[in-house]
Amino acid sequence: MNIAIVGASGAVGQEFLRILEQRDLPIDRLELFGSPRSAGTTCRFRGRDLTVRLLQHNDDFRGIDFALVSAGASTSREFAGTITRHGAVMIDNSSAFRMEEDVPLVVPEVNAADAKRAPRRIIANPNCTTIQMVVALAALERLSHIRRVHVSTYQSASGAGAAAMAELEQQHAALAAGGVPPVSKFAFQLAYNVIPHIDVFTDNDYTKEEMKMFNETRKIMHSDVRVSATCVRVPVMRAHSESIWVETERPISVEEARAAFAAAPGVVVMDEPAEKRYPMPLFLAGCDPVYVGRIRKDLACENGLAFWCVSDQIRKGAALNAVQILESLL
Amino acid sequence: MNIAIVGASGAVGQEFLRILEQRDLPIDRLELFGSPRSAGTTCRFRGRDLTVRLLQHNDDFRGIDFALVSAGASTSREFAGTITRHGAVMIDNSSAFRMEEDVPLVVPEVNAADAKRAPRRIIANPNCTTIQMVVALAALERLSHIRRVHVSTYQSASGAGAAAMAELEQQHAALAAGGVPPVSKFAFQLAYNVIPHIDVFTDNDYTKEEMKMFNETRKIMHSDVRVSATCVRVPVMRAHSESIWVETERPISVEEARAAFAAAPGVVVMDEPAEKRYPMPLFLAGCDPVYVGRIRKDLACENGLAFWCVSDQIRKGAALNAVQILESLL
C-alpha cells in the first residue's frame, strides 16, 4: 500500500506520521508533500528520513492508494483533481468538500459504511469539534433518537495550528517576564482570556465553526437532530472540551447512558466525581479516545441528559480520525 | 451612616473598600474586621489608614448601620448574631443564609424590593455566577416567561480568592521557566487546563456551584424556571463568562431581545460580531456592568435564544452587588 501525506509539516501532518508509525499498517511507500516553504525539508519515519516534495499539478500521485490531506480548504479544492486522477482516494481534513452530496463525511465509530460510497474518491474528515461530539452522541442515539443538542465548547489553541500553539506559550512567557504578549495568530490575546469566536461569522450570527456542528452532525448521523453550539477558544494547548445537553425521544437514565458510553467504540468513561475523576484537557493530550464524564440528568428537561467530553484535537479530532477512515477501507 | 466590612483583607473585602471610595455614600464611620491573621494590618480609605480589628463576639457592632460581610459561610453563621444584635443590617456574601426563607436573596436590578423585608436583618448576596446571569435573564423575563435555562460557565480564578489568582500566575511563571507549577489552591493545575468542578458534588452529580444557579435563580426571580448548569474553571484572572440558552413561553426575536438587554439596568450590549465586538473576560476586568453579546436564535428550539455574558466576578459578582443592595435601602 502506498500512502501520501499532503501538508506533512503542519501540526496534523506531523501527527499523521506519528500515528502511521504507531499503527500496524502495511505501508510499502510513504510520500510527503508540502508547500514551497516546507518542500525540501525532511521528516523521520520508521528510522528513515523522508524528504517533503513540492505539491504540484503533475503525476506525482500515480501509484498512491490513499492521500491523507491537511493543507487547508483552498489547497484541497485546487489539488483534489491532481491527487485523485490516477486512482488515489483522498481523505481530506479540510472543510472544502464536507457538505457536498457525493462526498461522504465519516467518523468510523458512527458511519464507517458511508466511506465505501465515494464516487469522487474524496472522503471528508469532519471538523474536530464535531468528531468528538458525534462519537459520544452515537452511543445515546442507539438508546433513543436525539432531537436536540446544546453544546458549549472549550477549544484548544491547536485547532488554529502549530504556530498558534507556539504563540500561546509566547504570550505567557512574555507576560511572566513583564513584557507585551505577541498577538497575531488569534484576533485577541488568548492568554488569561477566552474568545467566543472561531472561524468567521455567518448570516444568522453563528460562526462557521458553530454551523459545522449543526450541519456535519446531521450528515454523519443521518439525523434531523438540531444542534445549537457556542464555540469558544480557551488558553489550552491540545485538547478540546465540550459541555453538552441532549434531549432524546424517550427519557434515558444516567445508568443507561453510562452503560452505553462504556460500551461505545472510541469512548472512555471517566466519571467518578467523588474521586475527582472527570476528563480535563491538560491530562488527555496525546490520547486517542473521547473521554466522557459529568454524566447526569438535564435539570431543565425531562428527556434530557448532560455530560462533558474531552478529546485531543490533533489526534482524534483530526489525524487519527482520518487514519481510521483509511483503516476502515482496508 | 456607619459601615463595617468583615473580611476586609480578602479579595472581595478590598473591592468593598475601592467601591465605597468611588461611590458617593455619606459614610461617617468605616470599621474593618478580620481574622486573627489580618487583625492589626491597615487599609487605606479616603486618605486615611484604617486598622483591621479582630472579629470577636462582643459589642463592636453597636452603632453600625450596615455590615458588608465576606469571610466565608462558617464565619457568617458563627457571627450573624453578634453582627446584627444591635440593629446592624448584615449583607452577607457567603452561601450561609441564601436559601433560608426569612433571608432575602437580592440582585437590585431584579428584586430590589425583597431587600426591604429582612426580619433577621440579614440580606444574602447571591453566588457570582447567578448574579450576572439573572441580571441578563431579567431583561428577557420582562418579554416572556423563561421556562428553561442551559448554561455553561467559564469561571475565573478570582472566584477561589486572591491566593488562587496568585497561584495561577505562579503556575504560568513556573512553566515559562521550565519548572514545576505549584498546585494547592485548585484540585489540579489550572494553567493550560479547564476544570469541570467548582465547589463540592451533591447527590445528583451536579456540584453545589451548579445547584446554586438552579436554586438561587428561582428565588431571586420568583420563578419556576429550571436551570441546568455546567460550571467550569478556566485559566482567567477576574471575569466570569457564561454561554446561555433560554426557552421562553412565546418566541422572542433577536431584535426584541437586543432591545430588552439594551434597556435593562446593569446590562451593556456588546454585540457587533462583524467588528469582532463581543464580551471577553480579559478586557472587562474592573468593569461594573454585565456585558451581553453573541445574541442569536437557539437553533435547537423555536422558542429559544442563545447569548453570551461576561462580568467581573469580584466586582458585580460579589462586592458591587452587595454595595448596591446597601444603596437600595437608603
Image (cartoon, coloured by chain):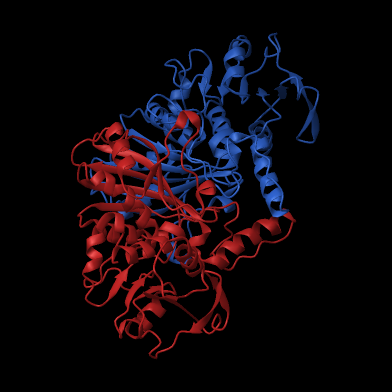
Chain colours: A red, B blue
Residue B140 spot, x, y in % from top left: 34, 43
**In this rendering, does residue B203 appear at all?**
yes
For the residue pair A219 and A329, the one nearer the viewer reads as A329
The residue located at (53%, 65%) in the rendering is A187
For the residue pair B224 and A275, the one nearer the viewer reads as A275
Residue B86 relative to residue A91: left or right: right
Would you place residue A253 above or below residue A201 in this image?
Answer: above
Farthest residue in the bottom direction? Answer: A58
Residue A119 spot, x, y in % from top left: 21, 76
Residue B210 spot, x, y in % from top left: 43, 33
Quadrant (top left/top right/bottom left/bottom right) for the C terminus of chain A = bottom left
Quadrant (top left/top right/bottom left/bottom right) for the N terminus of chain A = bottom left
Residue B272 relative to residue B66: left or right: left
For the residue pair A34 and A246, the one nearer the viewer reads as A34
The residue located at (41%, 67%) in the rendering is A200
The residue located at (30%, 54%) in the rendering is A109
For the residue pair A298 and B286, the one nearer the viewer reads as A298
**In this rendering, does residue B142 appear at all?**
no
Would you place residue A265 above or below residue A81 in this image?
Answer: above
Would you place residue B161 above or below residue A83 in this image?
Answer: above
Tally of numbered tags: 0
Residue A188 spot, x, y in % from top left: 56, 61
Would you place residue B85 above or below residue B288 in this image?
Answer: above
